[in-house]
Image (spheres, helix red, strand yellow):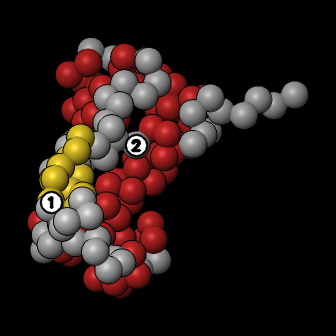
Amino acid sequence: MIQKPQFADMKALYIPPFTQRYYYDRDGNRFTEPVERNLQPTGIQVFDRWLQALSKGQTDSLRFCHAEGIDVQPFYGFIQVLTGMSQSDFRDRYLLLLADDLLRFTDQTLAEVGRRIGMTGKTSFNKFMKRVSGATPMQRRNALRQPGDLNRYVW
């Protein structure tokens, strides 16, 4: 019997970039409340540190493994076993969630969002988004953003 990967739900692993959310009371006064950010969603230290690195746009798995003192290939196999995805597929899906949040809720330029998720520039971000989501960053922003979304969060 094939077991479902322990961490197949990407959203359960995702660490949002936002620290606070704005909300309004009945009188129209604006307040903030903390955004729940579980920095250790798996309880597996090295995997949680990888998720934290991805959340900061630090996407170089070779550099991460070197800093952690671990071999790359076993780490990739570890991610495959835990998530059911290759390391590169997992990274891309994670970065898409991060890009989606930044595109939807901030007024950062496309180049800024691209740099924030670890891309080297607007062109590489555009190629990444087309490959992973099938849309350009601007198309994705326009499809995701709802009235009241812009600047709803503090990051």
| Quarter of the rendering containing residue 137 | bottom left
Gap in Å between the C-alphas at discs 2 and 1? 27 Å
Say the numbered circle drawn on residue 133: none
Residue 9, image x, y percentages: 57, 42
Viewer-proximal residue among 117 and 121: 117
Say the numbered circle drawn on residue 14: 2
| Quarter of the rendering containing residue 92 | bottom left
Residue located 45% across and 54% down the image = 93
- Using the rendered image of the protein, determine whether residue 29 is visible from the camera's viewpoint: yes
Kindly identify which residue carries mark 1: 30
Q: Amino acid at mark 1?
A: Arg
Residue located 15% across and 60% down the image = 30
Residue 114, image x, y percentages: 20, 64
Viewer-proximal residue among 17 and 121: 17
Tags 2 and 1 in contact by the CB under 8 Å rule? Answer: no
Residue 87, image x, y percentages: 46, 41
Which quadrant of the figure contains the N terminus? Answer: top right
Residue located 35% across and 64% down the image = 100
Circle 2: element type: loop
Label 1: few (<14), some or many (≥20) within 10 Å?
few
Tell me which label, 2 or 1, sits earlier in the chain.
Answer: 2
Circle 1: element type: strand
Q: Of discs 2 and 1, which sits in the foreground? A: 1
